[in-house]
Image (cartoon, rainbow, N blue to C red):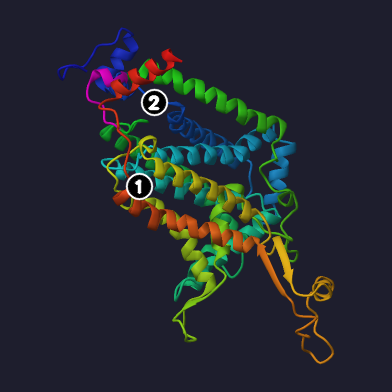
């Protein structure tokens, strides 16, 4: 559209529709000639990939809902029927089941890109907040979807996670009863989760619409973090980035298809192929892999918080874990106000780059810690006489006949580093990154010289390649 006039289309059908409802003009403006920074790298593919995965999840989810029965007596069998008797039911379910994991993979990389290149900074704060809201809605949707097969992990995962809300003062028990629809995880719970699991993807789609709208108002960030200053800094979205996004999507889908066809259960838990049994508790209850870092943060709080040198408890360990877990998401929401450094991209902030990469490593370690039993010991040593240490290993510090340990021989000092301590260590770094490191670097970090324009940065990169 030039000079306020609608551009005419050669196709008569398109022209007839557009003259009455200018949807094609809108698409041409927002996705055709829309000016986009010319230095995007492949990290920028993951926004389009996430959109593709959302549509895939909605389409396969609607199809599965046509065959699923949300009843505790029939849910597990209905899933097995989908797998065995419905035409291509196994394929649709594996696409949906693995699609959840690959949707989170795309979104986690998308979040990392935003953190690395400073896409949360002014004027894109609302864009970032909407992205975190999408992430929260995805977590809620995925949790409820994990319950629907009504396997052992489905049942016990729902029991453990919903019980967390009982730690909320005053209204906690009422929240749990509302979630359950009764006094235990049962038929009413499954029906509620099924209804919400079906509804929330459409809510996500609406928030994604706002997210994309905000993106087109503020424009895209880019690897240099420098705002475009003219036509020499931008390219039209089509065909340059439609082709680049298509290539990235094809590579992503090839990997996705490899999991769907050759290892469809690699990202799941085998216990979920056992029907839910309230009388048999699994040896180790774990959520899906994409929740594990936050699950580790939840389990890291094993102590009450109170007034020092008194017996007054202000926050019990259970409530402290819930606060720490949800606080980890809240920190993402307020990140634009924690990092106020004028330079956006980590390319020109050496200390921020290093601490962010350690943060990413810490999140991976938290994910591992969340997948392991809380009491798993990684390192242990005994300080004391050899005989006493051997007795401790053999009898786990058993008391003598009088009920007391022999201090000299039977009560050595045992030092150990277990899974809970590992989770606590990296939970401390997680919070320190946001609450200490970011504000400190905002004031103290000296940035490297940034290019005056995107055009200058692109030319400098091209010349560097030519000299090599």
Q: Is residue 43 above or below residue 68?
A: above
**Residue appearing at x 83%, y 71% in the figure:** 390
Residue lying farthest to the left in this orientation? 3
Q: Residue at x 39, y 35 (%)?
A: 347
Answer above or below: position of 429 versus 82: below
Q: Residues within 10 Å of mark 1 (few under 14, many from 20)?
A: some
Can residue 227 be found in the magenta stretch?
Answer: yes
In the picture, measured across the screen, residue 251 lies left or right of residue 154, that is left
Q: Does any portion of residue 361 appear in the rendered image?
A: yes
Name the residue beneath numbered marker 2. 40
**Over which residues does the magenta segment extend?**
226-235
Q: Position of residue 273 (x, y in %)?
A: 74, 49
Residue 62: x and y in percent read: 55, 38
- The answer to which of marks 2 and 1 sits earlier in the sequence is 2
Please tell me whether mark 2 or mark 1 is closer to you in this view: 2
Which is more toward the observer, 210 or 389? 389
The quarter of the image holding the N terminus is top left
Element assignment for label 1:
helix
Instruction: Give residue 465's quadrant in the image.
Output: top left
Q: Secondary structure at mark 2?
A: loop
Residue that appears at 53% across and 33% down? 56
* Residue 186 visible somewhere in the drawing: no
Horizontal and vertical percent position of residue 400:
83, 86
- Between 264 and 182, the one lying in front of the other is 264
In magenta stretch: residue 5: no
> Where does label 1 land, which residue?
129
Total marks in image = 2
> Mark 2: few, some, or many residues within 10 Å (few <14, many ≥20)?
some
Near-viewer residue (85 or 455): 455
Q: Could you tell me how far apart the alpha carbons at marks 2 and 1 are, in whole angstroms?
A: 22 Å
Residue 69 position in % (x across, y down): 64, 48
115 sits left or right of 302 in the view: left
């Amino acid at each position: 559209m030039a000079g306020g006039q609608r551009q005419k289309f050669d196709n008569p059908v398109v022209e007839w529709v557009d003259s009455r409802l200018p949807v094609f003009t809108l698409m041409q403006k927002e996705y055709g000639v829309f000016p986009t920074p010319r230095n995007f790298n492949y990290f920028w593919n993951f926004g389009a990939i996430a959109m593709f995965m959302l549509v895939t999840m909605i389409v396969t989810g609607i199809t599965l809902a046509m065959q699923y029965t949300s009843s505790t007596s029939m849910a597990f069998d209905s899933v097995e029927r989908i797998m065995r008797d419905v035409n291509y039911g196994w394929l649709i379910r594996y696409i949906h089941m693995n699609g959840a994991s690959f949707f989170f993979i795309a979104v986690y990389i998308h979040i990392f890109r935003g953190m690395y290149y400073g896409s949360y900074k002014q004027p894109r704060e609302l864009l970032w907040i909407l992205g975190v809201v999408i992430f929260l809605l995805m977590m809620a949707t995925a949790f409820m979807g994990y319950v629907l097969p009504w396997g052992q992990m489905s049942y016990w995962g729902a029991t453990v996670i919903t019980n967390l809300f009982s730690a909320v003062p005053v209204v906690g028990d009422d929240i749990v009863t509302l979630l359950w629809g009764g006094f235990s995880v049962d038929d009413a719970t499954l029906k509620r989760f099924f209804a919400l699991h079906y509804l929330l993807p459409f809510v996500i789609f609406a928030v994604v619409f706002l997210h994309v709208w905000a993106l087109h108002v503020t424009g895209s960030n880019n690897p240099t973090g420098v705002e475009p200053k003219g036509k020499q800094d931008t390219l039209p979205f089509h065909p340059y980035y439609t082709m680049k996004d298509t290539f990235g999507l094809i590579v992503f889908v090839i990997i996705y298809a490899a999991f769907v066809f050759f290892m469809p259960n690699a990202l799941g838990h085998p216990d979920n192929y056992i029907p839910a049994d309230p009388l048999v508790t699994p040896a180790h209850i774990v959520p899906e892999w994409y929740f594990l870092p936050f699950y580790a943060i939840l389990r890291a709080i094993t102590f009450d918080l109170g007034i020092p040198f008194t017996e007054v408890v202000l926050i019990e360990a259970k409530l402290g874990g819930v606060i720490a877990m949800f606080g980890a998401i809240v920190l993402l929401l307020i990140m634009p106000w924690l990092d106020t450094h004028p330079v956006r991209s980590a390319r020109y902030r050496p200390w921020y780059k290093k601490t962010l990469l350690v943060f990413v490593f810490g999140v991976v370690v938290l994910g591992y810690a969340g997948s392991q039993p809380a009491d798993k010991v990684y390192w242990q040593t005994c300080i004391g006489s050899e005989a006493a240490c051997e007795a401790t290993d053999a009898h786990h510090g058993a008391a003598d006949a009088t009920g007391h340990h022999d201090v000299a021989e039977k009560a050595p000092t045992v030092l150990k580093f277990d899974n809970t301590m590992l989770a606590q260590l990296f939970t401390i770094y997680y919070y320190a990154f946001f609450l200490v490191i970011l504000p400190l670097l905002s004031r103290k970090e000296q940035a490297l010289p940034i290019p005056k324009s995107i055009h200058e940065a692109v030319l400098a990169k091209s010349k560097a390649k030519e000299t090599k």
